[in-house]
Image (spheres, coloured by chain):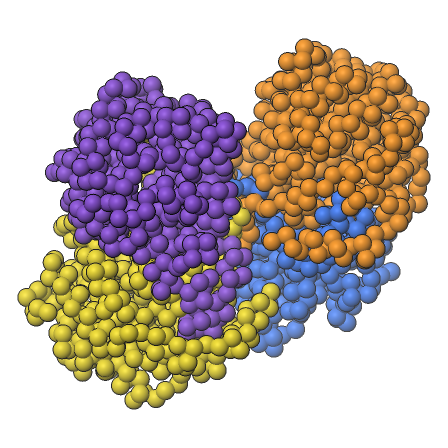
Chain colours: A purple, B yellow, C blue, D orange
Amino acid sequence: MAPSGTKRGILERLSVGEVVIGDGGFVFALEKRGYVKAGPWTPEAAAEHPEAVRQLHREFLRAGSNVMQTFTFYASDDKLENRGNKLSFTGQQINEAACDLAREVANEGDALVAGGVSQTPSYLSCKSEGEVKNILRKQLDVFIKKNVDFLIAEYFEHVEEAEWAVQVLKGTGKPVAASLCIGPEGDMHGVTPGDCAVRLIKAGADIVGVNCHFDPMTCVKTVAMMKAAVEKAGLKAHYMVQPLAYHTPDCSCQGFIDLPEFPFGLEPRILTRWDMQQYAREAYKVGIRFIGGCCGFEPYHIRAVAEELAPERGLLPEASQKHGLWGSGLEMHTKPWVRARARRDYWEKLKPASGRPLCPSMSAPDGWGVTKGHAELMQQKEATTQEQLRPLFEKADTKY
Amino acid sequence: MAPSGTKRGILERLSVGEVVIGDGGFVFALEKRGYVKAGPWTPEAAAEHPEAVRQLHREFLRAGSNVMQTFTFYASDDKLENRGNKLSFTGQQINEAACDLAREVANEGDALVAGGVSQTPSYLSCKSEGEVKNILRKQLDVFIKKNVDFLIAEYFEHVEEAEWAVQVLKGTGKPVAASLCIGPEGDMHGVTPGDCAVRLIKAGADIVGVNCHFDPMTCVKTVAMMKAAVEKAGLKAHYMVQPLAYHTPDCSCQGFIDLPEFPFGLEPRILTRWDMQQYAREAYKVGIRFIGGCCGFEPYHIRAVAEELAPERGLLPEASQKHGLWGSGLEMHTKPWVRARARRDYWEKLKPASGRPLCPSMSAPDGWGVTKGHAELMQQKEATTQEQLRPLFEKADTKY
Amino acid sequence: MAPSGTKRGILERLSVGEVVIGDGGFVFALEKRGYVKAGPWTPEAAAEHPEAVRQLHREFLRAGSNVMQTFTFYASDDKLENRGNKLSFTGQQINEAACDLAREVANEGDALVAGGVSQTPSYLSCKSEGEVKNILRKQLDVFIKKNVDFLIAEYFEHVEEAEWAVQVLKGTGKPVAASLCIGPEGDMHGVTPGDCAVRLIKAGADIVGVNCHFDPMTCVKTVAMMKAAVEKAGLKAHYMVQPLAYHTPDCSCQGFIDLPEFPFGLEPRILTRWDMQQYAREAYKVGIRFIGGCCGFEPYHIRAVAEELAPERGLLPEASQKHGLWGSGLEMHTKPWVRARARRDYWEKLKPASGRPLCPSMSAPDGWGVTKGHAELMQQKEATTQEQLRPLFEKADTKY
Amino acid sequence: MAPSGTKRGILERLSVGEVVIGDGGFVFALEKRGYVKAGPWTPEAAAEHPEAVRQLHREFLRAGSNVMQTFTFYASDDKLENRGNKLSFTGQQINEAACDLAREVANEGDALVAGGVSQTPSYLSCKSEGEVKNILRKQLDVFIKKNVDFLIAEYFEHVEEAEWAVQVLKGTGKPVAASLCIGPEGDMHGVTPGDCAVRLIKAGADIVGVNCHFDPMTCVKTVAMMKAAVEKAGLKAHYMVQPLAYHTPDCSCQGFIDLPEFPFGLEPRILTRWDMQQYAREAYKVGIRFIGGCCGFEPYHIRAVAEELAPERGLLPEASQKHGLWGSGLEMHTKPWVRARARRDYWEKLKPASGRPLCPSMSAPDGWGVTKGHAELMQQKEATTQEQLRPLFEKADTKY
C-alpha cells in the first residue's frame, strides 16, 4: 500500500472552501450485488471478494468522489461475531484488505483514503467506556499501519459513544471527522444536533456532520442546526453530510430503521439524479463542503452531486462522459417523444409516479422507543433463537 | 475464448422442463454505474471498460443466471453511429469484446453464452428487408467466429423485423430465441401477441417470448397469450420472459418508453425482491421455463428469481450465501423491531410506501402514436439539432 | 297532486335534441343528512320526514334538474321487509308520499315527475317472472294513480329482470326509460352493454342507459357502447346516464359495491365540480341527452352539469346565482392568493391531493363472483343472524 | 322568538363535565346545496332561503347537536359589502332571521342558541380598535334583542382582534366562548396557542378553543396546547373544538386556505364517519367538552361524534335510528360480501383509497406569508378588477 501524503489533505482542502465529494454507502450497494448480507451488514467482502469492492470504489471515483472510505463499517470484532454471524476472516484481515483496496483505487485519481469506525454492539450492551474504546482501538491499529489519510467516526446514534470514538481517533494525530446518524430531533437520548456538534468539536473533531438514517434534505437541515449552534458557541469546524438515497418524510428520531420497508422494501423511495442535484445545491448553500452519500447511493447519485457542483469545482467527473447534463443525452434517442425530454425544465418539474396504486405514499414508522439500556437491545454472540423471536413478532403484530 | 459444447445446450435443458435463469439488462445497470450513456444506450463499455462489464456478468452468474448474454445490445453499425453518437471502437471490436467477456464468466459456472441482436434504426427508417438483414449479419459473423452457444433476437417492436432477424439467425444452425418488446396489445402495428408468436415460430424460432417495455406480471400475461395461440395453432415452442424491473400499470402499447419518467425518473417503480419472487412463481406456473430480466434488474432481482425456484431447480445460487431467505438474515440485526421482520408473511404482506407524498401513483403516458413510417421516426447519422428539437418540445408541452 | 301534461313531455324534449338534466341519488344524500339507513337503503323518509325529501328535491331543482324522480328506490314490498327491516309505513304510503313530494317541487319549476322502480330481492331469490312482475305492478298502480309524467326502470344488474320491468311499465302507455347498473363488462351474467340495450329497446324502452355502480366516465363509455350496438342493429332510442359521483377506476363488473370502501369509506373518491363539468361535456359529445346523477351526487354536482351545458341549454340554473363560473366568485375572497385562483385554467389543471398519505390510490375490489342463483344471494324476511354472518366474515378475512 | 332560560345553560353543562356537541359549518354545507356563494361566503340565505337554513339546523339537531349557532358568519356590515358583494338584505335583517331560525329549531330539542361573530375585514384593513369594536357591536345588538343563550367569537386569525371581540361580548353579561382559527404554530403574528388562550381568558372568555382551518386531530392538539398553558398559568376555563372535516396534514400556519385545493377541490380530503369517531374520542380524552365541527361537516359527521360519545352522554341522537353502529346496518344488505363488512374492526382498519391514481396524497401549500398590514390584504367595497387580479395570477404562477 502506497504511503499517503502526496496529495493535499482533507483539512487543507476544506480550509480553502473546496468542495470534497464523498462516496456512497457500500453495504447497501454490495448487498444488491450479492456480496453483503442484510442483517449483520458486515464487510467481509473486502477480504472475500476484493474484485467486487474494488469495482465499486472505482465507480465512485469515476463518479467524482474525492474520498475512498475503507469498507470497514461494522468491522469491530464484537460486531463481526454478533448474533451468530459466521465469518472465515478475522477483523484484522478484513480491515487490512479494506485499506489496501481503498488505497489502490484512490491512487487512480484525486482521492484520499479515510479509515472509518462506527458504533459498537458493546456500547448498546452497556459495556464500559474502556471496553468500547478498546474495541475501536483495534481497528485503529490497522488504519495507522496502513497510513490512511484521515479518520471518520460515523454512524453513531449516541453522542456519548461518538465522543469516546473521537477521543480515541484524536490520539493518532490524523484529522478526525465525526458523523452521527441523527436527524433534527437529535440523538437517541434526546441531545439536540447543536449540542451534539459542540460536544464532538470539544472532544477533538475537525469535521462534524451526519450520515445515514434520513433523506438528503433532512440531513442538510440537521447539519445546518449543528452549524448554527457551533457558531453560536464561538467554535469553528468543517461540516460533512452523507445522507441516505431514500426519501424519508415519515421518519421520526430513529430514522429509516423504523420504517416498515427497512431494509427490503425501500425501492420506491430511491432518489432520482435530479433529487440529488437539489440536495447538492442545498448542502452547498448552507455551507457544507464535504458532501457525500450513504445507504442507497449508487455511483450515478454521486455523479449527480458532482455535476451539480461542477461550476464550483471547475470540473466534471470522468463518468460524465457517459451522461448528458440535464437529460441532453436523450437528443440521441430514437423516439421523438423521448428526444422531447432532453431539457432541464422537463426533469426539474417531473413528479415521478410510483407505479404502485395499491401502496400508500407514507408509512407509519415502528417507534418502539427502546434505546441503550433496554433489555431488547442487549447484543449476544449466539444466534437469535425462535424463543427470542416469538415475543418480538407478537409485539410487532399488535402495533395496530 | 474457449469453445462451447462442454455444457448441455439451451434446448436440451428446456426440453426436459429445466428452469433456465436469464440475466438482467446491462444498459440500465451499467448506466447507473457510469459506463453506458442514456440516450444512445450503446454497449461500447464491452471494449472500453471490460472490468465493469465482466463484474456485472459475474454478479448475475453468482445470482443464479444460466445465460450470459453478450453485451451487444444496439451494437449494429447503424445504431452505433445514430444521431451523432461518437465512439472510439468499431462495431466489430465491441461485439468481439462482448463475446469474450461473456464466455470468460460463463466458464466460471454453469452458464451458456447467448449472442444477441436487437432491432435496428434501419428498419425504423424504412430501409429494405435486404438492408436490414445485412446489418444483422455483420453482428452474426462475430457470434459465429466466437462460437456462442445460442442466439437471441430480442427487443423487437415490429414482428416483421423480428421475422427477418430469425430468418438470418436460423441460417447459422444455432438454436434461436425470438423475443419481442410488446405487451398484451401486441406489436406496434397491432399484431396480437398470439399471432406474433405463431409467425416467429414459423420463421424458425425455437424459443419465443417477450422482454423489456413492461413489468413482470404484464410480460408473463403476454407470453401466456402467445403460448395459448401457439398451442391452438398446433405448433410447439419453448417460452422465455425477460421483463423490466419497473412497475408499469399505466403503460399502453409502447410500454415504459411512453412514461413521463422514462428514463431518469423510474426509481419509484423499481420492484422489490418479493415482487420478483411472485413474478418467478407466476412465470413458472404458466409454463415459461427461460426466466430472466431486462432493464432495471440488479443482481439481487435475479437472485430472488433463483431463490423462488430453488425447489424446482434443486439448488440455491452462490449469492444466497449473502441472503437469508424471506428476510431471515434479519435475525442477526441489532434492533429488536427489525428482528421482528425476519419472516415471510411480513414481507409478503408489506405494501411499500413511496416516500413521495407530492407524487401520484400513476402517470399519463405520452402516447404520440407515431410508429414506423412516421417522419419523426426517421433516424439520421447527424446529431439532432436545436431546430429539430424545438417542435418536439412544443408538441410535448401542449399535451394538456 | 296536480295533473301532469301542462309541460312538454320527456320524449318531446329528447326528440328535438334538448338536454334534459336528471337529479342526483337520494339514498346516499339523505343518508348523510340522517334520514336513510345504509344497509336496507329504503325510502321511508318520503312518508316519515317529508320536509327533508322536499328540501332535497328543491335543491336539485334549483341546481338545474328537469326531472324529479319519485323517491321510491327499493320501495317494492319485498325489499321494504327484507332481512329484518322494520318500517311504520306501508309500501303504498311511501310510494304515494314520494309521488306527491316530487310533483309539488316539480310544479315549482320546469321539471317532470318520473316514477321509478328498481331491481327486486325476489329476482335475486330466483322467484318466477310472474312473481317479480306482480311486485313491480304494485308500485306502478301508485304511479298511475298519481299520474307521473314518465317511468324509469333503473338499477337493474340483470338485463332479464330489466326486460320484465320494461314489459310491465310499457303496459301503462307512459314513456319508459330503462337503466342498468352495469359497466363496460356488461350485466351480471356477462351480457354486453350493446346486447342489453338492444334487448331493452325490443322490450319497449324509449330511453336506455346506465346508472349507479361506476364513475361518470365509465358510465358514459358504457352508454356509448350501447348506442353503437343499437345503431348497428338499425334501432332507434334516446340515451340516459346517471353515474356515481365517486371515482371508480379500480372496479370490475359489480362496480362500487365490491370496493372495500363501500359504503362508509367512499369520501376520498367524491368528484369535484370540475370533474362533473368534464363528465357533462363528454356525455353530451357521445350523444347522450338525459344526463343526471346517482349515489354521491350533491346539488352542486348537478349544478356543475347544468353550468357546463348552459351554452347548449341557453340558461343557467337558479343556484348559479350562488356560484361564480369556473371559480370567479373567488374574486371576492379576502385573501389575495385565493383571489389568484379565480380562473378556469387553475381549476382545470388542479390534481387534488387526498390528504391521506397512509392510504393508497386504488383498492383491490372484493370480487366474490356470486350472482343470481348462488345461495349467499337468497334474500329473507328475517334479520341476518350471527350464525349467518360468521362464515361471511371468515370468507372476507381470507381474501389475502 | 321564544325566550331562552328554560334550559340549562352552556356553563352549567360544562361545569359538571357534560359533553356539549356543537353543530357543523353552515357556509360549506349550504354552498354544496346551492345557497351560499364561495368567495364572499356571506350568510344571506338566512333571510333569502330560510327553509334551507332551517332544514340544516334540524339535521344537525337530529344528529345530536346541543348548540344551534346562528348563521351569522361573516355577517358584519363591512364583510357583507366587501369587494363588490351585492345583497338584497341588510346585515340587521340577516342577523335577525338567523336568530329566529336557530331558536325555532333549538326549541324542537335540547339545544342552546349561540350568537356568533367572526373576524372582520376592518381589522385586516388596519382599522382602529374602536372601529372594529363598533362593527361587532352592531351584530351584538341583534343577539341581545333576540336573547341568544350565549355568544361565540370564532374564526379569528389574530388573537388581538379576538381579544377585542371578547371584550365587546363580555359587556353583555352572557357567557362568552372564544375560538381562533389557528393551529399548533399559533396565530398569524406567531403568538403560540398557549399564549393566545391565556390572553383570551384574561380578556373575559369562559370557553376557549379553536375552529376551522385544520383537521380534527390537529385542532385537538392545538387545544391541548392551550389547556396546558392555561393550567400552567393557574387559570381556569372550559375548552371547545370545532375543526374542519378535511384532512390537512400538509398545512402550515394559515391552514387549509393555503391548500391549492381550497375551496373547490377538497373532496378527496373529507373525513369518514370513522375518522370522526376517533376525533371525538381524542377530544374527550384531552379534556375538551364542547365538541363540534366547522367547514366540511355534514350531519352524519356530527352524528358520528354523538355516537362515539354515547356512553358518556347516556344517549344516542335521533338520527341514529337511521344508522347501525359501526356498520351493523349492513347486516340488512342484499349482497353477502357487504354483509361481511357489518363489524367494527373492518371499518377501523380500512385505509380508504382515493380512486385518483394521477393525484398525489399531499399538496404544497401556497404560503405567501402575507398577513395584516400587507397591502395585498387591504379590503375594499369595490369589486376586484382584472388589473388587480393580473399580478396575483402571475405571482401564483411563478410559485415553482
Residue at 36%, 58% (x, y): give it: A317
Q: Is residue C311 left or right of residue D325?
A: right
Q: How many marks?
A: 0
Q: Can residue B104 be seen here?
A: yes
In this picture, is A225 found above or below C315? above
User: Whole-percent x and y of residue D328?
Assistant: 55, 32
Viewport quadrant of the C terminus of chain C: top left
Q: Is residue A108 above or below residue C78?
A: below
Q: Quadrant of residue B245?
A: bottom left
Seen in the picture, residue A346 relative to B232 is either above or below; the reply is above
Q: Report whether B121 appears left or right of A232.
A: left
Along the viewing direction, whichever of C17 and D286 lies nearer the viewer: D286
Residue located at (71% from left, 65% from top): C289
Residue A285, how many percent across, how many down?
51, 46
The answer to whether one can see residue B216 in this image is: no
Is residue C64 left or right of D256 when viewed as pictured? right
Q: Nearer the viewer, residue B237 or C139?
A: B237
Q: Residue pushed farthest left?
A: B6
Residue D72 lies, in percent from the top left, at: 84, 34
* Relative image position of residue D169 (x, y in whole percent): 85, 22
Res. D293 image quadrant = top right
A146 in relation to C181, above or below: above
Nearer to me, B372 or A398? B372
**In this image, C362 relative to D85: left or right?**
left
Give the residue displayed 24% in from the left and 28% down from the top: A136
- Report the residue at 22% width, 77% height from top: B92
